[in-house]
C-alpha cells in the first residue's frame, strides 16, 4: 500500500481550516457594496393573493428595493424546473405545475415566497418585511396524504384531479398475482414512513452578484452541485448562458440531499443583483429553513409478501402513496419511484414483484431526496415486512432472511424491478454482524436489563441500496432530464505538484483527502503536494455534484481515469528522456524506470520537461501535462449490509434507548477507512433519528407544528451509543476502483433495525407493530393498550 | 440608536457600534469580521455559536452585544497559540471529530469549558455536556473520542502529541 494511498486512514487535509475557524461558508462571504435580502413568506397554506401592498416597506429608510412576483413576471423569469419526469400507468406524463420563484397570484404552502425586501442591513430588511401587507383570500387546504386522497378532497392544483401528480407502476402484476394464488402463507403490513427535515447544521444561503461591465453573474450558494444549479437556473429560470454565469459552492456545512435542489432564493438573489447592480445576500434563519428546505420521506404503504410452507418468498405486492408537497422539487418525482420501488427486491430472491406508486400534491413544502432518498423507505417497508413474515412462517428472523438471500453464485442478479445487482455476499455480512454484536449472548443481556426493570429487544435489517447514480442512457430512459456522469481534471504543475479539478462536491465527506489519496496512489507524488479543487464552475470544467453516494463511485473513477491518461503521457515523455520505448517504461512510486535497467527519471522531472520542452518529442506529443476524463458508469453500485440494533425500553416512561448497534457493511473497496466509519456513524445517527426522534408534523390547516429545533428533535450526543462498525468487501465489478459508496447506508439500514428491536422488546405484550418514530408517548400508549 | 461596546476579543482591545438588539454573535461575525463562530439556528439549540465570555462557554446568539461591555471574549480564532494548534483542536483532527466543520468551532469551545471544569471527563459526562451542541454529520462518537483525547493531552500540558 502506498503511504497515504488507497486504504490508508489519512487524517483530513480540510480539517485545519475548520478547527481553526477559518473555513469559508457562504454566509462568511461578504461582497463590496453588498445589500441584504429578507424573503416575505406566506403564513397560510393555500390562498389567492388578493392584494399586495409594499408601499410602507419601500418607504422604510435603508430599504433599497422590494420586489414581487409581478416584477419577476415582467422580466419573464421562468419556473423552477423539475429534473425528472414520471409517466403514468397509461404512458401519459405526470402533471407538472409551474413554480415561480416568487408566487404570482396564489400561495400553495406555508413558507411560499411572495416578495423580497432588500436593504442595507439584515435587520432593516427584516423589519421592513413586517410592513409588507398581503391580503389573502384563503382556499381549502390538504395538509397530508390522507387528506389529499379523501373523497371530495380540495385540490392543490385544479388541473390535478384527486391531487394525483402521477400514478405509476413497476413489475409484473399478473405474475405477482399468480404468486399470491400459489402462496400458502401471506404476511402483510401497513407502514407510514415519517416525514423528515434534513437540517444540515449550516442554513442555506445565497449571494447574487452582477458585473455590469462584463454582463456576468456570480452566485455563491450552499449547494452540493454547483454545475447543476448553473444549468437549471441559467437555462430554465433566468435565461443566462453558462459562460456568463459562475456558481460557487464554497465550504458547505452539510447537505444530506437538501442542498441538491435549485431553490427559489438562488434565482431571486441572482436576478435582484442585476436589477440593483449590487451584490444581494440572503441567509436562512433556521425557522425559515424548516418551511423552505425540501423535506424528505413521507410515504404511506401497504405491502404483502406471498410465501410457501418453507417461508420461501414467492411474490411481493406494494402500494405506496408518496407526498410530493405543493410543487415538484428538482428530483422529487424520482424518489418514490425509481429510487424506491426498484429497491423492493432488497437482498432477496423474490421471483415476482409488483409495485404501484401514487405521487400526490399537498399544501406542504416540496418533498425531495433526503439521505438515502427512496431507499430508506423501501428498506424500512421490506425489512419490517420480512420480520412479520418470519412470525407468519414460524421462523427466526435471521433464518428467513438466510433462506431467501440472493447467493454469491447468483450474481449478476436481475431483479424483477429493473435493477441488475453486480455482486454481493449478504450471508457473510450477517455472519460478521452476528459475531461483532455478540448476538448469541443477547438473552443474558436481556435478563440483566429485566433485573433493572427494563425491556430489551434486538432487531436486524439486511438492507441494500443502489448508489453511484448511474448510466446516463438508463437514467434518461427512466425520466432523468440530466446526464449522470462525472468529470475530473488532473493538472500536473511544472514543479510536480498536482491540482485536481473535480465535479464532485465535498460538504463534509472529505474529498480533499480521499481524492488526494487516489492521486498519491497513481502518481506517487507527496500527499501534501496534491490540491483538490471543487465547488466552482469557474474553475472546474464540468460536474454533476455529490448525492446518492456517488462521489467515489463516479467522481473518483473519473479522476482515476484522468490519472491513467497522465500516467500514459508521462511514460511517453519518460521514454523520450530515457531513450527507450514507452512500452518498456514502468511507472511506480513516482519513478519512471526502463524495465530491467537502472535508467530512471522522477515524475517531477517529467512534469518539468512537459512544461519546459527543450528535450521533448514535440513532433509526437503536445507540451503540458493536464488531462480530463468524463466517466459515465455502466451500472449503479449496490452497497448492502447487515445492521443489528439492541434497545432498552423503560416500560414506565416509554423511553427507548439504543444501547448497542452493530453495522457490517459492504461498500466495496475502501479508500479511507476512517472517513468511511465516520460516514457510517453519521448515517446511523440520522437513521436512529428517524426511528426514535425526528418527525415533521403539519396540522390540518397546513401549519408546520415541528417548525424549529425546539419542536423537531435532532439526535443529541447522549441519544446514541458507540457504534460497532465493520466492513465486508465484495468489490464492485464494473468500476476500476471497485468502490460502491457509503454515505447513505446508515440512514437506510438503521430505521428498520431499530423498530424491529423495539417490536421485539415489546413482544411480551403481544405488540407486533410500532409507528415510526417510536416516541416515548407512542411506546407508553402501546404498552398501556396491551395491558 | 447605536451604542459603542468595548471589550477584548482574543486578547485584543476592540470596540463596535451596535444596536441595542444586536446579538453578540452578530457583532463578532459582522462587525468584528471573525466568521469562525457560526449561526446554525434561531432558538439557541445548536451551539454552533459557542464562545467564551470571561472564561465560560456561552451561546453567543443568546447574549446581547451590549452585555459584552468590558468582557473578555475568546472565539475559535483565539484558541491556538501562535499558529500551533491547541491540543483540543489537534484531537478533533486526529480522531475525525468533524466532517462538514460547521458545528466544530462551537464543539471545541464547549469542550474546552468542559475540560476546564472536569479535566478527566468520561464518555457519559462528555455526551451529557454536549447536549447543547448539535452535530448532524458525525454521529458524535468521534467527537466524544476527540474530547477525551484532547482532555488527556491538556492534562499532560499539551505535550502529548495528538
Image: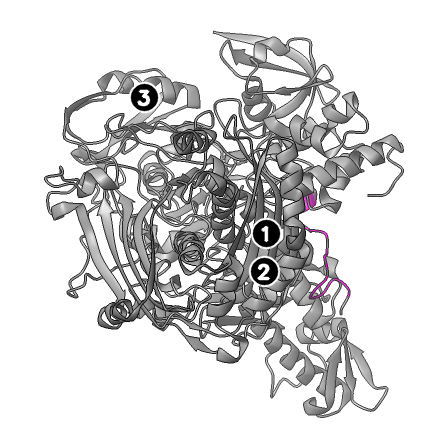
Q: Residues within 10 Å of mark 1 (few under 14, many from 20)?
A: many
Choose top left, top right, bottom left or bottom right for residue A386.
bottom left
- Which label belongs to residue B77? none
SS assignment for the magenta stretch, majority: loop
Q: Earlier in the sequence, mark 2 or mark 3?
A: 3
Q: Is residue A414 left or right of residue B140?
A: left
From the image, which quarter does the C terminus of chain A lie in? Answer: top left
| Distance between the alpha carbons at the discs numbered 2 and 3 | 50 Å
What distance separates the C-alpha of mark 1 from that of mark 3? 42 Å
Instruction: Look at 53% across and 22% down and name the residue there.
Output: B44
The vertical placement of A505 against A222, above or below, is below
- Name the residue beneath numbered marker 2: A665
Residue A774 occupies quadrant: top left
- Camera-nearest residue between A81 and A668: A668
Q: Residues within 10 Å of mark 3 (few under 14, many from 20)?
A: many
Of tags 2 and 3, which is closer to the observer? 2
Rounded to the nearest angstrom, the CA distance separating label 2 from label 1 is 9 Å
* Secondary structure of the residue carrying numbered label 2: strand
Residue in view at x 54 percent, y 22 percent: B26
Identify whether A67 is placed above or below A18: above
Could you say which is closer to the camera, residue B29 or residue A728?
A728
Q: Which residues are magenta?
A: A3-15
Q: Which label belongs to residue A129?
A: 3
Q: Earlier in the sequence, mark 2 or mark 1?
A: 2
Residue that mark 1 sits on: A680
Chain letter belonging to callout 2: A
- Compared to residue A517, the image places residue B155 above or below, namely above
Chain identifier of the residue bearing label 1 in the image:
A
Asked if residue A474 lies left or right of residue A86, the reply is: right
Mark 3, secondary structure of its residue = helix
**Residue for point 66% across, 86% down:** A617
Amino acid at each position: 500500500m502506498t503511504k497515504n494511498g488507497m486504504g490508508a486512514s489519512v487524517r483530513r487535509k480540510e480539517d485545519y481550516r475548520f478547527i481553526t475557524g477559518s473555513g469559508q461558508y457562504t454566509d462568511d462571504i461578504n461582497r463590496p457594496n453588498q445589500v441584504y435580502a429578507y424573503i416575505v413568506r406566506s403564513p397560510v397554506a393555500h390562498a389567492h393573493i388578493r392584494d399586495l401592498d409594499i408601499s410602507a416597506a419601500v418607504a422604510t429608510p435603508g430599504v433599497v428595493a422590494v420586489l414581487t412576483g409581478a416584477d419577476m413576471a415582467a422580466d419573464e423569469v421562468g419556473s423552477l424546473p423539475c429534473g425528472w419526469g414520471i409517466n403514468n400507468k397509461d404512458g401519459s406524463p405526470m402533471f407538472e405545475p409551474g413554480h415561480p420563484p416568487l408566487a404570482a397570484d396564489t400561495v400553495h404552502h406555508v413558507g411560499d415566497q411572495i416578495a423580497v425586501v432588500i436593504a442595507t442591513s439584515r435587520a432593516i430588511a427584516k423589519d421592513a418585511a413586517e410592513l409588507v401587507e398581503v391580503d389573502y383570500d384563503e382556499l381549502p387546504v390538504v395538509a397530508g396524504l390522507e387528506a389529499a386522497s379523501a373523497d371530495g378532497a380540495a385540490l392543490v392544483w385544479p388541473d390535478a384531479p384527486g391531487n394525483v401528480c402521477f400514478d405509476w407502476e413497476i413489475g409484473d402484476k399478473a405474475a405477482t398475482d399468480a404468486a399470491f394464488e400459489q402462496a400458502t402463507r401471506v404476511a402483510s403490513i401497513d407502514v407510514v414512513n415519517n416525514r423528515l427535515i434534513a437540517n444540515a447544521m449550516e442554513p442555506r444561503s445565497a449571494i447574487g452578484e452582477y458585473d455590469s461591465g462584463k454582463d456576468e453573474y456570480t452566485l455563491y450558494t450552499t449547494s452540493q452541485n454547483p454545475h447543476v444549479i448553473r444549468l437549471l437556473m441559467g437555462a430554465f429560470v433566468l435565461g443566462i448562458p453558462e459562460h456568463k454565469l459562475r456558481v460557487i459552492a464554497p465550504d458547505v456545512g452539510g447537505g444530506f440531499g437538501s442542498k441538491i435542489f435549485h431553490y427559489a432564493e438562488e434565482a431571486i438573489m441572482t436576478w435582484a443583483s442585476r436589477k440593483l447592480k449590487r451584490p444581494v445576500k440572503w441567509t436562512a434563519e433556521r425557522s425559515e429553513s424548516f418551511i423552505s428546505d425540501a423535506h424528505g420521506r413521507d410515504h404511506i404503504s401497504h405491502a404483502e409478501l406471498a410465501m410457501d410452507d418453507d417461508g420461501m418468498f414467492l411474490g411481493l405486492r406494494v402500494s405506496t402513496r408518496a407526498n410530493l408537497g405543493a410543487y415538484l422539487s428538482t428530483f422529487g418525482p424520482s424518489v418514490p419511484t425509481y429510487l424506491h420501488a426498484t429497491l423492493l427486491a432488497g437482498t432477496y430472491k423474490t421471483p415476482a414483484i409488483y409495485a404501484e406508486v401514487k405521487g400526490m400534491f399537498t399544501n406542504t413544502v416540496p418533498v425531495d431526496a433526503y439521505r438515502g432518498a427512496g431507499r430508506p423507505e423501501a428498506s424500512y417497508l421490506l425489512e419490517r415486512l420480512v420480520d412479520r413474515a418470519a412470525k407468519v412462517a414460524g421462523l427466526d428472523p435471521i433464518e428467513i432472511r438466510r433462506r431467501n438471500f440472493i447467493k454469491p453464485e447468483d450474481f449478476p442478479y436481475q431483479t424483477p424491478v429493473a435493477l441488475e445487482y453486480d455482486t454481493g455476499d449478504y450471508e457473510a455480512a450477517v455472519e460478521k454482524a452476528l459475531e461483532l454484536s455478540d448476538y448469541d449472548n443477547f438473552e443474558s443481556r436481556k435478563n440483566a436489563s429485566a433485573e433493572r426493570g427494563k425491556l430489551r429487544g434486538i432487531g436486524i435489517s439486511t438492507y441494500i441500496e443502489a448508489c453511484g447514480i448511474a448510466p446516463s442512457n438508463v437514467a434518461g430512459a427512466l425520466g432523468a432530464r440530466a446526464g449522470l456522469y462525472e468529470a475530473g481534471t488532473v493538472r500536473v504543475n511544472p514543479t510536480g505538484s498536482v491540482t485536481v479539478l473535480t465535479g464532485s462536491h465535498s460538504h463534509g465527506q472529505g474529498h480533499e483527502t480521499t481524492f488526494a489519496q487516489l492521486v498519491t496512489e497513481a502518481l506517487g507524488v507527496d500527499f501534501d503536494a496534491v490540491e483538490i479543487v471543487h465547488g466552482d464552475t469557474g474553475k472546474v470544467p464540468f460536474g454533476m455534484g455529490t448525492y446518492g453516494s456517488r462521489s467515489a463511485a463516479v467522481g473518483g473513477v473519473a479522476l482515476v481515469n484522468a490519472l491513467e491518461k497522465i500516467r500514459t503521457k508521462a511514460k511517453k515523455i519518460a521514454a523520450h528522456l530515457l531513450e527507450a520505448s514507452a512500452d518498456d517504461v514502468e511507472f511506480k512510486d513516482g519513478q519512471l524506470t526502463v524495465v530491467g535497467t537502472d535508467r530512471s527519471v522522477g515524475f517531477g522531472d517529467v512534469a518539468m520537461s512537459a512544461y519546459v520542452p527543450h528535450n521533448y518529442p514535440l513532433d509526437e506529443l503536445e507540451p503540458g501535462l493536464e488531462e480530463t476524463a468524463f466517466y459515465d458508469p455502466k451500472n449503479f453500485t449496490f452497497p448492502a449490509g447487515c445492521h443489528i440494533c439492541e434497545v432498552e425500553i423503560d416500560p414506565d416512561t416509554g423511553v427507548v434507548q439504543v444501547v448497542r448497534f452493530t453495522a457490517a457493511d459492504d461498500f466495496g473497496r475502501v479508500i479511507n477507512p476512517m472517513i468511511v466509519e465516520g460516514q457510517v456513524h453519521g448515517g446511523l445517527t440520522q437513521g436512529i433519528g428517524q426511528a426514535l426522534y425526528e418527525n415533521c408534523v403539519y396540522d390540518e390547516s397546513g401549519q408546520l407544528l415541528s417548525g424549529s429545533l425546539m419542536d423537531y428533535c435532532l439526535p443529541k450526543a447522549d441519544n446514541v451509543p458507540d457504534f460497532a462498525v465493520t466492513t465486508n468487501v465484495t468489490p464492485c465489478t464494473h468500476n476500476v476502483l471497485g468502490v460502491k459508496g457509503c454515505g447513505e447506508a446508515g440512514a437506510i439500514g438503521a430505521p428498520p433495525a431499530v423498530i424491529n428491536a423495539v417490536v421485539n422488546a415489546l413482544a411480551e405484550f403481544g405488540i407486533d407493530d410500532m409507528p415510526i418514530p417510536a416516541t416515548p408517548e407512542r411506546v407508553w400508549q402501546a404498552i398501556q393498550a396491551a395491558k | 440608536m447605536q451604542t459603542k461596546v468595548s471589550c477584548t476579543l482574543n486578547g485584543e482591545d476592540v470596540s463596535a457600534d451596535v444596536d441595542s438588539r444586536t446579538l453578540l454573535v452578530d457583532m463578532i461575525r459582522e462587525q468584528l469580521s471573525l466568521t469562525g463562530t457560526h449561526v446554525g439556528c434561531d432558538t439557541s439549540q445548536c451551539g454552533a455559536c459557542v464562545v467564551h465570555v470571561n472564561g465560560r462557554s456561552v451561546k453567543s446568539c443568546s447574549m446581547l452585544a451590549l452585555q459584552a461591555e468590558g468582557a473578555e471574549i475568546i472565539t475559535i480564532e483565539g484558541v491556538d497559540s501562535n499558529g500551533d494548534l491547541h491540543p483540543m483542536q489537534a484531537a478533533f483532527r486526529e480522531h475525525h471529530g468533524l466532517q462538514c466543520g460547521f458545528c466544530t468551532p462551537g464543539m471545541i469551545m464547549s469542550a474546552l469549558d468542559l475540560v476546564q471544569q472536569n479535566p478527566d471527563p468520561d464518555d457519559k459526562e462528555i455526551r451529557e455536556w454536549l447536549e447543547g451542541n448539535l452535530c448532524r454529520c458525525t454521529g458524535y462518537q468521534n467527537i466524544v473520542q476527540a474530547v477525551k483525547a484532547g482532555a488527556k493531552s491538556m492534562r499532560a500540558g499539551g505535550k502529548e502529541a495528538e
